[in-house]
Image (cartoon, rainbow, N blue to C red):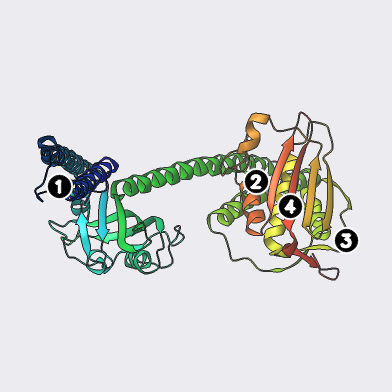
Amino acid sequence: MRALANPIVLRMLMGVVAAAFALALGIILIRKMRHEIKDESGTEALRADDARFPLETYHAVIERLKEQEKQLRELRRAEGERARASENISAALLANLPSGVLLFNPKGLVQQANPAARKILGYGSMSGLHARDVFRGAHLLNRGAEGASSSTAISAVEAALREGTSSRRLETEYATPAGEERVLGLTVSPVRASDGKSLGAACLISDLTEINRLSRQMRMRENLASLGEMSAGIAHEFKNSLATISGYAQMLTSEDQVEVVHDFARKIESETGNLARVVTDFLAFARPQALRNEPVPVRAVVENCARDCSVDLHAEDVPAELALMGDPTAMRQAFSNLLRNSAEAARNGTPVRVQVAAESDEQGARLTITDNGRGIPQDQLGKIFIPFFTTKAQGTGLGLALVHRIITEHGGTIAVSSGDWGTTFTLAFPAQALARAATASA
């Protein structure tokens, strides 16, 4: 059939048909001439040359037919060799692929499985197995994978067979017949003929077990490294505060003046407050709580936080009625951390001044918090929201990381810009975060 479909073969067949037609036409003409050329006695007067003409024509056509048949055999042989070579290449490609390839027929039965698929899935032979037998108990690890509408690999194959749906980048837990636990990556696609008829489904399989194990180890190492950095920061903070508290406590034992004693007591109280803040930030970051959803009056909360942080706040540009839906405690902590960051960035001898402005429309709300402190170096701007990153001699690097978490958990975004003098934090919240809270209290 492939030889007949070849254009050269078709042209040769057309030539043979034309030659046969010419032969038949010649014979008809000769017979007509034989009836017309007769002598008076009724015997044919056909000349010898005319008698040899049809015979020679016949032999010529036969020779041509033989030549055409020989060429046809050569074409069929060459076409067969190309087909066999193509099949051998396809078989070699499937046999040497490191990824597994499964072909299911329209009924869901395994029609072909390359060696990699049999090795990954733990089967010696898979011919005739149904998809339900192959992927029994295989549950997806990434429910949000592209094209996945269910939580099992079987459903992905059935969707490809029945609905023509492709599923890509699936990760599934799988147990081999011998009980070995593996993590597989799957891509399932329908296979259709040129006329659109379903021929089955193809499943590309990758063994992600080792990659998954290394990924878990890497995450564990990163967590341990982060824990080490956090522990070092907390230990440093506690060490400094405890040393300060211990020094003031020792001086209290030998101090008789009441005013000095009160001053030392206030400093001890301040240091214990710093320690409490470190613990609070750590617990809030490591163990985030469920957020409430209440109106939070922005201006009132910011003003209260400013008093606690001892900064010169200018918030006249913040409308008193502007409120955001969120958790009051979390929002208060975010604003407190931002204002405290401004206070700690104050230049020597320069009062801390913070300007807060806000605007809102149908798109949402936008707040800017600008201070007059030391700016943040440009090479550090992209790191300030990373947990445990800090540029301060004292600090754990959790303050701004916690601010970033709180703002994003409330559906907002936070950006920062800075120069040699002053830093500006820009907070943006979507329209659904806006609320009317003129009567709400801070």
Seen from the viewer's position, the closer of residues 174 and 338 is 174
Q: Where is residue 41 in the image (x, y as percent from the top left)?
A: 9, 49
Give the residue at x 68% y 64%.
327
Where is mark 1, residue-wise?
38
Name which of mark 4 and mark 1 comes first in the sequence: 1
Q: Do the residues labelled 1 and 2 touch (CB within 8 Å)?
A: no
Residue type at tag 2:
Leu
Residue 11: where, in percent of width, then height?
28, 42
Q: Can residue 182 be seen in this view?
A: yes
Q: Residue 400 carries which label?
A: 2
Say few, some or many: other residues with alpha carbon within 10 Å of mark 4 (under 14 / 14 to 19 / 20 or more): many
Name which quarter of the figure residue 65 lies in.
top left
**Residue type for callout 4:** Ala
| Outermost residue toward the bottom in this view | 439
Circle nearer the N terminus (1, 3): 1
Please identify, in this view, whether the residue under mark 1 or under mark 3 is nearer the observer. Answer: 1
Work out whether residue 73 or residue 37 is closer to the camera in this orientation and state it. Answer: 37
Amino acid type assigned to the residue bearing label 1 in the image: Lys
Q: Name the residue under label 4.
A: 428
| Residue on which the image places disc 3 | 320
CA gap, disc 1 and disc 2: 121 Å
The secondary structure type at the circle numbered 2 is helix
